[in-house]
Amino acid sequence: MIVITSPRPRRPKQPHYTGPVGGLYDSRFRYTPAVATDISKTFKRVRAEQRGARP
């Protein structure tokens, strides 16, 4: 005996937001430590890349 049932109903896909992150509770928020965002190191790296050298 073969029982044919309809597939499970699925929830609709959640919309993928492309706008700015809404805050800490937004699932797209990624924490970046302050050490990784040191602006002086960033400018130093960019200037080195512009010169064609690697830091």
Image (cartoon, helix red, strand yellow):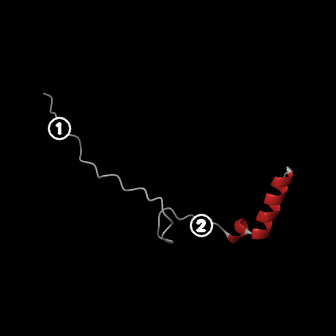
- The image's mark for residue 31 is 2
* 46 w.r.t. 24: above or below: above
| Image coordinates for residue 8, horizontal then vertical, percent | 24, 45
Q: Quadrant of residue 5?
A: top left
Q: Residue at x 50, y 66 (%)?
A: 21
- Residue drawn at x 16%, y 33% is 4
Mark identifier at residue 52: none
The residue where tag 1 is placed is 5
23 sits to left or right of 49: left
Which residue appears farthest toward the front when viewing the image?
50
Q: Position of residue 34 (x, y in %)?
A: 69, 71
Position of 52 with respect to 4 (left or right) is right
* Residue 50 sits above or below residue 8 on the image: below
Given the image, on which type of amino acid does mark 2 rest?
Answer: Tyr
How far across and how far down the image is residue 28, in percent? Answer: 50, 62
**Closest to the observer, 9 or 37:** 37
Residue 3 position, x and y percent, is 15, 33
Find the distance from the CA under tag 2 to the CA under tag 1: 45 Å
**Mark 1: few/some/many CA within 10 Å (<14, 14-19, 20+):** few
